[in-house]
Amino acid sequence: MSTEPTPNNTPVVKTHFQDLNLAPPLLKAIEDLGFEHCSPIQAESLPYSLAGHDVLGKAQTGTGKTAAFLIRVIDDLLKNPITEERYAGEARALIVAPTRELVIQIAEDAKLLTKYTDLKIHTLVGGMDYQKQQNRLHNEFVDILVATPGRMLDFRERQDVHLDTVELLVIDEADRMLDMGFIPQMRQIVRYTPRKTHRQTLMFSATFTEEVMRLSEQWMHEAKHIEIASESVTTDNVEQHVYMVAGDEKFTLLYNLLNTHGFDSTMVFANRRDECRKLHDYLKAYGIKSGLLSGEIDQNKRVKTLDAFKSGKISVLVATDVAGRGIHINDVSHVVNYTLPEEPEDYVHRIGRTGRAGSKGISVSFACEDDSFRLPAIEELVGRKIHSEVPPEELLTSLPEPLTPLPVQQRRGGSSRHGGGHRQDGHRSGGRGHSSYRR
């Protein structure tokens, strides 16, 4: 343990990973990653989980919760090696997450933490070659299995995976599981594992709703409850801005922002798949190197897009909330809310894509006549007033000519609006709706 003074001179106790009696290969991997102190969720949960207790943790994405449960899983598997005969498809630890991107990210983190071990990590996700995943299960033992609910059941029902040997069960983003309708599948998966008194269960959620609490009572044994406040995630590391802008100025504003110094790695969120698709098409037409993440995109293409974003080959990632949830990229400089989310919690998750791993980030939200009414609920959730401002005039100047033809948009009611509301000649459109909102 160590203490550091805070601005009000109240000492903050920090937990060192070295103080947790972790297995040496795991501790060495943690040191290689440059981590010395536990994050709050790790410091609160690990003493309980490492002692064998079930843990129900409330924490937002970006708080270190993935490492919190992976450290427990890996430490247990290393300290309790299997001595009897093993069979293909028998999983020792099962981690279930709601999205393919999150499963892949968890597996990548697990590989880093098992660098000095011979533990085998398998992923089961839809949209990728079933046969390849099946062949690997038949050829290698399964120590840590990370899966989405649907694909997990596919493999279990075909007898390619056996869950009666699971020693540790991790359920990540339980509230999102509820939102996405995965609870019936999760009930089946839990029934295939040993009963709750014969396994350790760790469950994490951004919120403790009544449904989440009921599930924890059904699936967990005398769980310890850990809560990490969400306010620190959104206010401490992320500088938040809201631009009051007319709907037909949004694309012009986005284009000029992306061409501003410092917008090196930017995630842009919109609420619907069609909005994201249209926005991505317009960015490409104007020469912005961008990628698209949404549920309709083939999984292999999504993986390639994420890799291109991480490597800097593309500088902008356009995403829906479901596709963007759980993406762990430490160097995202900016998050842009092209449309304000319908649920305040999604705002927290969006801006949590930046300001990670102790670095500072910037979020920019566009509030127009259609969605500005969502701001008060967002401000209430994050516990602060977000300064609203009219964007500088230079960010609303005319667009250049597109480099390639703009996509044809379907007309509604005899009119056609383009990606940012600008006219084909590149000038901003005016009109009564435009000017009345700006006043």
Image (cartoon, grey):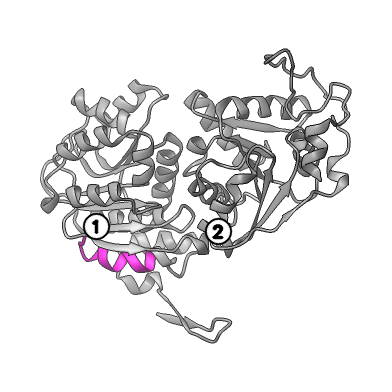
The magenta-colored residue range is: 42-54
Picture coordinates of residue 155 (x, y %)? 25, 27
Q: Residues within 10 Å of mark 2 (few under 14, many from 20)?
A: many
- Quarter of the N terminus within the rendering: bottom left
> In terms of depth relative to the viewer, which is nearer, 366 or 71?
366
Q: Position of residue 393 (x, y in %)?
A: 87, 46
- Dot 1 lies on which element? helix
> Is residue 127 shown left or right of residue 308?
left
Secondary structure predominantly adopted by residues drawn in magenta: helix
Select label 1 or label 2 by which is in front: 2
Q: In which quarter of the image is residue 16?
A: bottom left
Is 199 included in the stretch rendered in magenta?
Answer: no
In the rendered image, residue 93, in percent from the top left (x then y), is placed at: 25, 46
The amino acid sitting under disc 1 is Asp
Q: Residue at x 60, y 50 (%)?
A: 375
Outermost residue on the bottom side: it is 9
Q: Does residue 120 appear left or right of residue 314 in this picture?
A: left
The residue wearing badge 1 is 76
Q: Name the residue under label 2.
A: 234
Residue flagged by tag 2: what amino acid is it? Thr
Say which mark, if any, is on residue 343.
none
> Is 153 or 111 nearer to us in this picture?
153
- SS for callout 2: helix
**Which comes sooner in the sequence, label 1 or label 2?**
1
Q: Above or below — where is 340 with respect to 79?
A: above
Q: Mark 1 and 2 residues: CB-CB less than 8 Å, in contact?
A: no
Is residue 49 inside the magenta stretch?
Answer: yes
Q: Residue at x 63, y 31 (%)?
A: 291
